[in-house]
Amino acid sequence: MRLGLSSAAAADADVDTLLAASARRGLAALELRDEDMHGVSDATSAAAAAVLASDFGVAIAGLRITSAAPPASTNAAAVAARLDAPVLAAHGSTAERIAAVQAFEARGVRAMVEVSGPADGWLTDVARAGADVAWQIDDSVSDMAGDLRLIQSTVPGRLRYVRLLGGGPEADMADGRGIGALMGQLALARFDGPLIVAPSSPRYHVAWGAWLGRRGGWGCGSKAERDVVTLSSTGMEE
């Protein structure tokens, strides 16, 4: 399991800054959303970002597509390929996301369907499609570990990616949601994909900025900034 950060945590930061912040926090992966200002928007910038990520020792976990652009567009496929990262289809209905995944895969690009909330609301459709899954856990999920067991038994080997809304500076507010049980279940299942933390709401942007070391604003990142913080057993806070 690789703990990581979504670019949603600092939507106005460039990829250099996001990678530096991830390294400082001891996070091993970075998710890029197409709606953020990270600057990775074409094959050339994606290739540069991949080199920079390697330099920081942070993997690009995925390219999350939320826009209404045509599914499996040539540009998105090229960006994902240069990043050597899968696409998360996160726009439209579940059926539209499944169709987008199939279109990306036809282009030779790894892709997965992003689903959100309790498993019983989407598991049947995803199982029927045979698609790989990126599960977004929001506050509507009351039994994270129980849902995880259901997913693993219904679509074994298909859960490739987990997004947790909250964590980081919001960890104290997540008490009672079962994050510890989720982490334990993922470890028990030897989950080897990314566990990405992201803000549950844009209103927490100041707290996330401070948590990532944005006191007074960030400049461009550099390898010299890597004062890595050791994560706790929950992986969510110091």
Image (tube, rainbow, N blue to C red):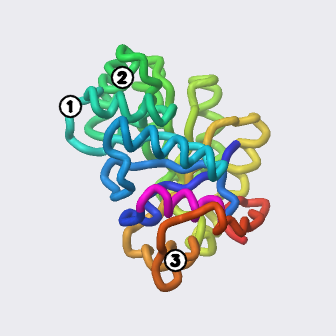
The quadrant where residue 105 appears: top left
Residue 222 quadrant: bottom right
Q: CA distance from mark 2 to mark 1?
A: 11 Å
Q: Nearer the viewer, residue 223 or 19?
A: 223
Residue 222 visible in image: yes
Compared to residue 187, the image places residue 214 above or below, namely: below
Q: Residue at x 36, y 14 (%)?
A: 106
Calculate the distance from the C-alpha at mark 2 to the C-alpha at mark 3: 36 Å
Question: What amino acid is at disc 2?
Answer: Phe
Circle 2 Cα neighbour tier, 10 Å, few/some/many (<14 / 14–19 / ≥20):
many
- Name the mark nearer the viewer: 2 or 3: 3
For mark 2, give the secondary structure: helix
Is 15 one of the magenta-colored residues?
yes
Compare marks 2 and 3 and give the one earlier in the sequence.
2
Return the x and y of residue 172 as percentages of the image width and height. Answer: 63, 74
**Which mark, by number, is residue 214?**
3
The residue type indicated by label 1 comes to Pro
The disc label shown at residue 104, or none: 2
